[in-house]
Structure formats: structure tokens, C-alpha cells
Amino acid sequence: MRTPLTADMFDELCPTPLSPIRVGDKWAGMIIRCLEDGPRRFSELRVPLRDITPKSLTHSLRALEQRGLVSRNEQPRSVEYALTPLGRSLLEPLNAACAWAEEHWDELVDAHEAAYQETRHTA
């Protein structure tokens, strides 16, 4: 039996526009993280990805499937999504990108706030 995904798996800021490193669309990295420990059904993915609409989740899953990162496996009464070997190969670079963003978070926030203030003064 799989361990259920938790609603607090991701920070409430995720996905954030502050991160300069992105895999696919804004939800792709989080979807890949959700599939890290094995296949998941659509409804399971909705738990930690509570802010994504069903339409956007479907779009993101299809895009990941088209890129060869996720497989869609139809079961008799459900569909499961899983990382392909290519998708699994993204876990290490994704871990490195997350560690980098965490290490430089304050700098990213400062740069974002400075740019926001700049646009407010020139508008």
C-alpha cells in the first residue's frame, strides 16, 4: 500500500513565480515530485496540488506525457500516472534546483520586490 500524499506536501507559495528554474509549466515540477514514490491517481494528485484546477492538472499531465516524462496507465476503473525512466532522471536535477532556490530564497524575494517597486514608480 502506498503512503498517501498529504495536503501540506508543498509550501503554500508553490508554485512560485520567484523561482527562475522551471521544468515545463508551473505545475510540472510539483507533479513530478508527487509521482516520485510511485504511480498516483488523478484524485491523489489533487490533494497536495489543491490550488490547481482539474483542467490545468489534466493539461499539465498531458504535456508531461507528450514529453515522455509521465506515463498514463489505464486500470479497469481508474487511470494512474507514473514517472517514466526519463521523468525519473529529472529527480536529481529537480532536487538540486530546489536546494538552490531554498539557499537563495531571500535574494530572490529581494530582487522580486525591487523589480515590483521599480515598476510601480515608472507606471
Image (cartoon, helix red, strand yellow):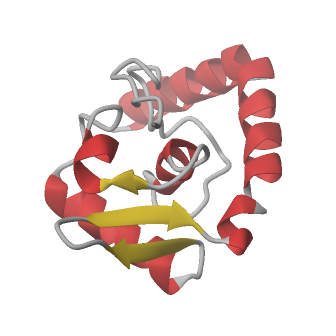
Residue 83 drawn at (x, y percent): 58, 63
Residue 71 drawn at (x, y percent): 49, 75
* Closer to us: 120 or 15: 15
**Residue in the image at 61% along x and 59% along y:** 23
* Closer to us: 42 or 55: 42
**Residue in the image at 48% along x and 85% along y:** 66
* Closer to us: 120 or 85: 85
Screen quadrant of the C terminus? top left
Give the total of numbered labels.
Answer: 0
Quadrant hosting residue 122: top left
Q: Would residue 35 appear left or right of 56 to someone viewing this image? A: right
Quadrant hosting residue 57: bottom left
Q: Is residue 14 above or below residue 31?
A: above
Q: Is residue 88 above or below residue 76?
A: above
Q: Would residue 105 appear left or right of 41 to someone viewing this image? A: right
Residue 75 drawn at (x, y percent): 29, 71
Q: Is residue 35 above or below residue 109?
A: below
**Residue in the image at 39% along x and 30% along y:** 4
Residue 67 drawn at (x, y percent): 56, 82
